[in-house]
Image (tube, grey):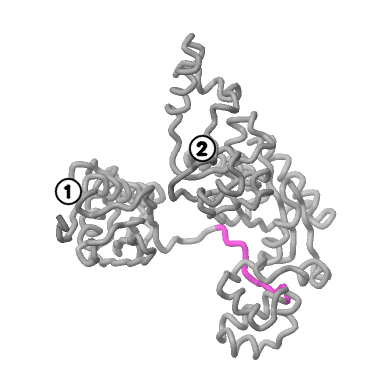
Amino acid sequence: MDAFYASCELLRYPQLQGLPVVIGGGRRKEDDLLGKLQAAYPDGEWTAETFVERLDRIPLDFFPRLEGYTGRGVITTATYAARQFGIGSAMGLMKAAKLCPQAILLPVDFERYRHYSRTFKAVITDIAPLMQDRGVDEVYIDFTGVPGGQREGGRVLARLIQKSILNATGLTCSIGVAPNKLIAKMASEFNKPNGISIVHEADLQTLIWPLACRKINGVGPKADEKLQSFGIHTIGELAAREQHWLMEHFGKSYGAWLFDAAWGRDDRPVETESEPVSMSRETTFERDLHAVRDRKELSAVFTRLCEQVAADLQRKGYTGKTIGIKLRYDNFQAVTRDQTLPEYTADAKQIRHIAGQCLKRVDLSRRLRLLGVRVGSLVNSATPPKTPPQDLQNELFAFQANDPR
């Protein structure tokens, strides 16, 4: 999907079309925007009842801008107009504010994005049932056996999918058609937004080899840095290296994979079903929090994370028996601890209790930047737990730390 979160927001606020918009920094607080409008228009023009119906009429001056932003929020996505300024996903909002202070900042609305995600995927499976889910905004499709799927090299079916998604959601997507998942993933980025790119096996040298090695899904920053240290910048230069050389310098398994990837080889099937290994929830704080001085706030956050993980497990029909926590300190050092239970669970209260025990095994005298809760060793439950997560907000946050005061 094209700039998925941002595109979902532009459906809500069509007056922002063509403008630099970034999504991130926190969850939606529409009451703040309504309050500003009511203060500016005291004649009662804006009310809680009519607010949702008139979102497309909110004047641009009332939307918050990046200019002057202070905090540690991170961009989830940005419109293509914002990307022209060098803004991209995972960039800090303070850095983005320097690049494009006039950009409009909107908070995330995950419930809305999940709705559109389910909708566009349902459209696809009606056309091509062999679909592999790759997150909220991306899928792989195998239409080898779809009637008419090979017409014009797949372009006819790709157009049908684009048109059907647009009609159902108002959103656009970009499609890469190729012999395998590796190249199709790269091709999907060629003509964004709303593009279709078809790569045949014979196009490898002309379309794929000139690309940077980072365009290969699976080559991260560290691997790319090491490749560049050997003078390997493009996929073609990578393909020119012998397999045994790559295995010698990058390890037997990864080196062999790099060689195959450079030559466009990928035999992975489109998997319509896959079992998750774990489920987790985490949050990065707007300011560093301390285990003692911010005990109440941390307790509420910790409880909410446990409840969210439990709700995720129950909704998807899984239980797990390895419960863990993740902390990131103010110096960006990260630590994890986990504990394995004798029985499987999806109960929020039990998850919170065991996660609290894990907290006792870490240093809590330093300020915290991030807190996360994870449940692993999952199994698919034939009958998901019937009771919803209990309200645990009044439980004490089990910290074991010396009070520096």
Give the class, few, some or many, for how many residues have Cα within 10 Å of label 1's Cα (few <14, many ≥20). Answer: some
* Residue at 49% over, 16% down: 46
In what element is the residue under mark 1? loop
The residue at the point 71 percent across, 50 percent down is 174
Between 40 and 364, the one nearer to me in the picture: 40
Q: Measured from the top left, where is residue 238 in percent x and y?
A: 71, 79
**Residue 112 badge:** 2
Relative to 154, residue 68 above or below:
above
Marks 1 and 2 sit apart, C-alpha to C-alpha, by: 33 Å
Residue 334 lies, in percent from the top left, at 36, 66
Q: Is residue 268 magenta?
A: yes
| Number of dots carrying numbers | 2
Q: Is residue 300 left or right of residue 8?
A: left
User: Outermost residue toward the top?
Assistant: 43
Residue highlighted by disc 1: 396
What residue range appears in magenta? Answer: 263-272
Within the image, what quadrant is residue 258 found in? bottom right
1 or 2: tag closer to the N-terminus: 2
Residue 243 image position (x, y, % from top left): 67, 87
Looking at the image, residue 333 sits to the left or right of residue 182; the answer is left
Residue 255: name its quadrant.
Answer: bottom right
